[in-house]
Structure formats: structure tokens, C-alpha cells
Image (cartoon, rainbow, N blue to C red):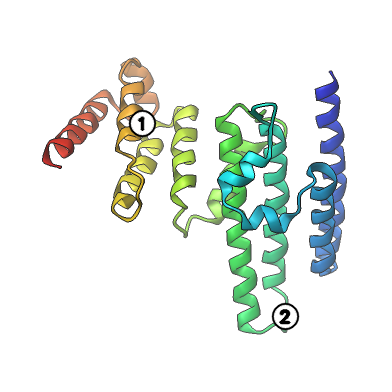
Amino acid sequence: MFRKDYLLRMMEEMTEAIGKVFTLKQQRKHTEALSELDELMRRQFGLNLSLLNSLPAEDVIEMFRFRGMIEVDNLQQAARLIEEEAYIYQEKAKVEGIDDQERMDAEDEAVIRLMRSLHFYLYALNHGANPKLLDAPERVEGVLGLTKEYELPARTERQLALYREQQGRYDQAENSWYRLLQLGAEFPVSYRDDVQAFYERLSPLTDEQLEQGGLPRNEVEEGLAELSRQEMNS
């Protein structure tokens, strides 16, 4: 009960703060809007947005570890604040009278924050966060729509693959895994074992389940066979 009340209080405070931010954005008071979000982050988590956007994502996630567990519901709330910060930069980029460099800088800052919030949403959902707390699945789809022209960081693509599998959207999960395999030559981390594990998790499913997920059994078997051929040729 205490935990539930604690989360509800945090949600109420966040909702109130985002309402203030919305008003400040309408008034084009972008600096004040950013300060409002930063202050909320400090009050709720003892962190600031600059730190959350500058450290490696894995280090930020570790900051939400308490008694050996990542507090994923807190993490998705932090993701929501970072997402809102991105929208402030988007609005800033639309202001008339700023020069092209300022506009491009604001657009870049928005994309960086959208990517960061997406990673944290996905990680939280993949590790048991309450999907109803912030309507996180809908927020994920919204951020994906806004960033569809950009290549996701490898660590985020991996979380997306796991998330699509969790949703039962196996064809989309496979697409993410193969994007990672294509990146393999550029990164020291090999995703081949992850892809094989993905197919092996699907193998025991029924034909109907696989069909519903957009990945028929013959494609699962072909995927495993292709990985075997690649291993033999390597």
C-alpha cells in the first residue's frame, strides 16, 4: 500500500508539473519550462536532466537500482520527463527569428532526448514496469513515430527487439535483430547468440501463435539454418 501511495503521489506531482510546462511552452518560455522539469527530477529522484542525458544509458539505469533491483516504474517516470524535455526543444526549434544553427541545435537536442526516453521506456517495460502507469506502450509507439527517420542506437534496437517479442510481434522483433546483425561489423558486440536464442524461444510455440506473430514456422527454421551456415563459414 505504501509503495502504491508513493507512486500515486509522484504521478500527481508529475502531472501538475507537466501541466505547468505545457503553459510555459505556449508562452514560449522554454528556459522556464526546462527549469520546471529539472526541478521535478531533482525533487523526485535527486538527479538532474543534464546528468541523465550525458551519462551512458546503462549508468543511468543503475542509478535507479535500490536493494539490488532496478525500480523500473521510477525509470519510466524519468523517461517521461526526458520525453517532455524533447518536446520543449522541438517547440524551441519552431520559434521565428532564431538563426539556422540555433534551430538545428534545438532539433538535435530533441532527437537525442527522444532516443534516450525511448531506451528507458523499453528497458522498463521489458523488466516488468506497469504499462498502465504512464500508458508507456502508447508513448513508445509515439516516440518511434517521431524518430523513424533515424537509426536507433544498437542498445535501444536490442531493447526494441525484446519488446516486440514480448508483444507477440515476432516479425518486427526479427527485423530489429537483423538490423543488429548488419551492424555487427561496426560494433565489438556480436548479436548472433541473441538472434539464435530468439529463434529457439519461438520454436516451441504453436503454428497458430507464430502465424499470429507474423513469423511462420518455416521462416523460424530458415532463420536458424542461416545462422548455422554463417557459423560454419566463419
Q: Which residue is mark 1?
A: 214
| Residue 49 image-quadrant placement | bottom right
Tell which residue pokes out farthest to the left in this image.
233
Residue placed most toward the observer, 53 or 201: 53
Q: Is residue 30 above or below residue 119?
A: below
Characterize the local packing of mark 2: few (<14), some (14-19) or many (20 or more) Cα atoms within 10 angstroms: few
Q: CA distance from mark 1 to mark 2?
A: 46 Å
Q: In the image, what residue occupies the spot 76% across and 53% down?
A: 48
* Residue 185 x %, y %: 28, 53
Secondary element under disc 1, as helix, strand or loop, is loop
**Quadrant containing the C terminus in the rendered view:** top left
- Residue 89 is labelled as none
* Residue 72 x %, y %: 66, 33
The three-letter code of the residue at mark 1 reads Gly
Q: Which residue is mark 2?
A: 96
The reply, left or right, for residue 150 in relation to residue 20 is: left
Q: Is residue 54 above or below residue 156?
A: below
The reply, left or right, for residue 27 in relation to residue 120 is: right
The reply, left or right, for residue 147 in relation to residue 180 is: right
Residue 125 shows in this picture: yes
Residue 142 shows in this picture: no
The three-letter code of the residue at mark 2 reads Glu
Q: In the image, what residue occupies the spot 44% across and 30% down?
A: 165
Tell which residue pokes out farthest to the front in this image.
67
Secondary element under disc 2, as helix, strand or loop, is loop
Q: In the image, what residue occupies the spot 67% across and 39% down?
A: 76
Total tally of numbered discs in the picture: 2
Callouts 1 and 2 close, C-beta under 8 Å: no
Please report whichever mark, 1 or 2, sits nearer to the chain's N-terminal start.
Answer: 2
* Residue 54 x %, y %: 63, 58
